[in-house]
Image (cartoon, grey):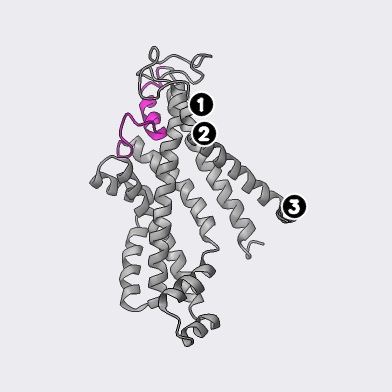
Amino acid sequence: MLAAILVKIYKKRKIDFLLTITGLAIVLFILFMALLAPYIAPYDPYISVDKALLPPSPKHIMGTDNLGRDVYSRILYGSRTVMIVVLTSTLVSLVVGSTLGLVSGYFGGKIDRVLSIVMDSLYSFPGLILAIAVAAMLGPGIVNTIVSISVVYIPTYFRMVRGQTLSVKNSLYVEAAIAMGASHKTILFDYIFPNVSVIIPVVFSMNVADAVLTEAGLSFLGLGVPAPIPDWGFDLKNGQRNLLAGYWWVSTFPGLMIVLLALGFSLLGEGLNELLNPERR
């Protein structure tokens, strides 16, 4: 049954299907890399294992950094850090933003006006600037980085869910539920939310792609994950100082991983948007 549905989608939307599968394959590859890091990493990513700034070789396939740590091992463990931060922060944004959007759109009135003003104020800031401001107040750390990135994307889910809720709450089935005496909680989560949640996977994928770049930017500026925790953004900055001296591998491989993961989520989000959006179809 599932195979027949996938074949049907592939025939009708071949390019969009390939975009989705390609993005999903990239994301799953890096996810498995993160899960298997303790088993496939050849060295401890926290300690010096050889001479500093050794070029890529059979012993160190991505070379060593300025402290003699294996770059490949730090790439593997860094994928765990990045995936934990970006997925957790985006999930927090989804839950908080969607809940506030439902409440605001459904009840309206003063609650809607206050929440809309607050969210519009946050939304007016460029994402990275807002994340930098929050991170500068909270300080470095994994939890603080998650909070800083979450604040950036809460208004996105709020505006999306609120707009859909405003249109759905006037539907006949919602009015019928109200007439039957259904509670506000039942109406919100059993009648309205299932009909506004269709576009959430698309927005989630696109936000995760942007969160990858935001997390890397915070770590690059020293406001994200603190040393010596393996992190692609921090390692990118760490290798920048040696780039002009010819030690290209220290910053090149973390940079390529950031681009690859962001590309994977972008392709996944774009493909899902094409497949699920009826207006696109």
Identify the residue at horizontal 48%, vertical 86% (top origin). Answer: 180
57, above or below 117, in the image: above
Residue 201 % position (x, y): 53, 56
Label 1 and label 3: CA atoms lie apart by 35 Å
Chain part drawn in magenta: 222-245
Q: Residue furthest bottom?
A: 179
235, above or below 64, in the image: below
Residue 188 % position (x, y): 45, 73
Label 2 and label 3: CA atoms lie apart by 29 Å
Q: Are marks 1 and 2 in contact (CB under 8 Å)?
A: yes
Q: Residue furthest left?
A: 137
Foreground of the two, 18 or 58: 58
Q: Which residue is mark 2?
A: 33
Three-letter residue code for mark 1: Ile
Dot 1 or dot 2: first in sequence order is 2
12, above or below 247, in the image: below
Dot 1 or dot 3: first in sequence order is 3
Mark 2: secondary structure: helix
Residue 262 % position (x, y): 50, 42
Three-letter residue code for mark 3: Val
Q: Which residue is mark 1?
A: 40
Q: Mark on residue 7? A: 3
Label 1 and label 2: CA atoms lie apart by 8 Å
Q: Crowdedness of circle 2 by 10 Å Cα count: few (<14), some, many (20+)?
A: many
